[in-house]
Amino acid sequence: RGRAGWEEIGAPTGNPAVVLRLLDTSSLASVRAFTRDLLREEKRLDLLVNNAAVTGLPFTITPEGLEETFTTNYLGPFLLTNLLLG
């Protein structure tokens, strides 16, 4: 889905600054790695839209010991935003 969105929105601009970065917000380790890489590779971030969520998943505990839906919808985006703010 990320690639399809980029093909529809980013590719037509022809702007190489429009990039696709994938992130699994159900994994706080993934959020930390994503943020570390983004801050290292980019000079600035102009906009952040936290607009991803899941519903209707069976109760699942992540490898980090957290409930998956809560982590995906709340904890992951919260951590991402706070790490980006510094």
Image (cartoon, grey):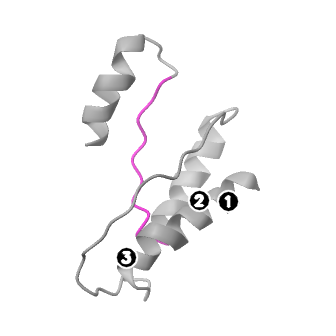
* Horizontal side of residue 49 vs 65, given as left or right: right
Q: Residue 79 appears at what percent x and percent y?
A: 61, 66
Mark 1 or 3: the one toward you: 3
Which stretch did the figure color magenta?
18-28
Q: Looking at the image, is 46 positioned above or below residue 35?
A: above
User: Is label 1 in contact with label 3 (beta carbons under 8 Å)?
Assistant: no
Of the numbered discs 1 and 3, the one sitting upstream in the chain is: 3
Q: CA distance from mark 2 to mark 3?
A: 16 Å
Query: Residue type at mark 3?
Result: Thr
Q: CA distance from mark 1 to mark 3?
A: 21 Å
Query: Residue type at mark 1?
Result: Leu
* Horizontal side of residue 43 vs 52, given as left or right: right
Asked whether 22 or 56 is in front, the reply is: 56
> Which residue position is annotated with label 2?
80
Asked whether 50 or 22 is in front, the reply is: 50
User: Is label 1 in contact with label 2 (beta carbons under 8 Å)?
Assistant: yes
**Disc marking residue 69:** 3
Q: CA distance from mark 1 to mark 2?
A: 5 Å
Q: Residue 34 appears at what percent x and percent y?
A: 51, 53
* Image quadrant in which the N terminus is located: top left
| Badge 3 element | helix
| Badge 1 element | helix
Query: Residue type at mark 2?
Result: Leu
> Which residue position is annotated with label 1?
83
| Badge 2 element | helix
